[in-house]
Image (spheres, grey):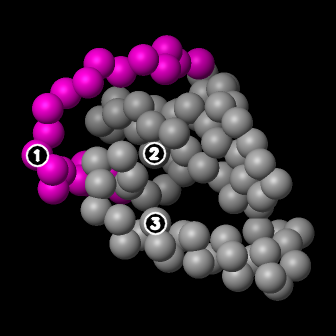
Amino acid sequence: MAHFHPYVSPSRKPNNFKPKIPKGIENFKIGKELGSGAFSTVYFAQHKPTQTLVALKQVQLEDLDQKHYDCCVKEVELLNRINSENYV
């Protein structure tokens, strides 16, 4: 895994800015692990085409019971509604 410096200088963007980054893990260089919880791990990553630095969350759905699976699905659904430059 490649490692990247986690500092990105701040930039001014309009409040409604949402970068157009195609989804698909093949579009990212995965770096070091930033943290983990019971059901997911977050990695530092870089979007290959745009060189945008991001935090990439990998959720482990395979071994979850129905209650926790439903919670993870709900979280993803809620995050998909967010219009923020901090979430793609």
Amino acid under label 3? Answer: Leu
Q: Mark 1 falls on what kind of element?
A: loop
How far apart, in angstroms, are the residues tagged by discs 3 and 1? Answer: 20 Å
Q: Residues within 10 Å of mark 2 (few under 14, many from 20)?
A: some
Q: Is residue 70 above or below residue 79?
A: below
Q: Residue at x 29, y 54 (%)?
A: 84
Name the residue type under label 2: Asn
Magenta span main SS: loop
Where residue 50 sits, quadrant-wise, is top left
* x, y percent for residue 21: 33, 51
Q: Which residue is mark 3?
A: 79
Q: Residue at x 56, y 32 (%)?
A: 44
Marking on residue 14: 1
Q: Horizontal placement of 33 versus 49: left or right? A: right
Mark 2 = which residue? 27
Residue 48 shows in this picture = no
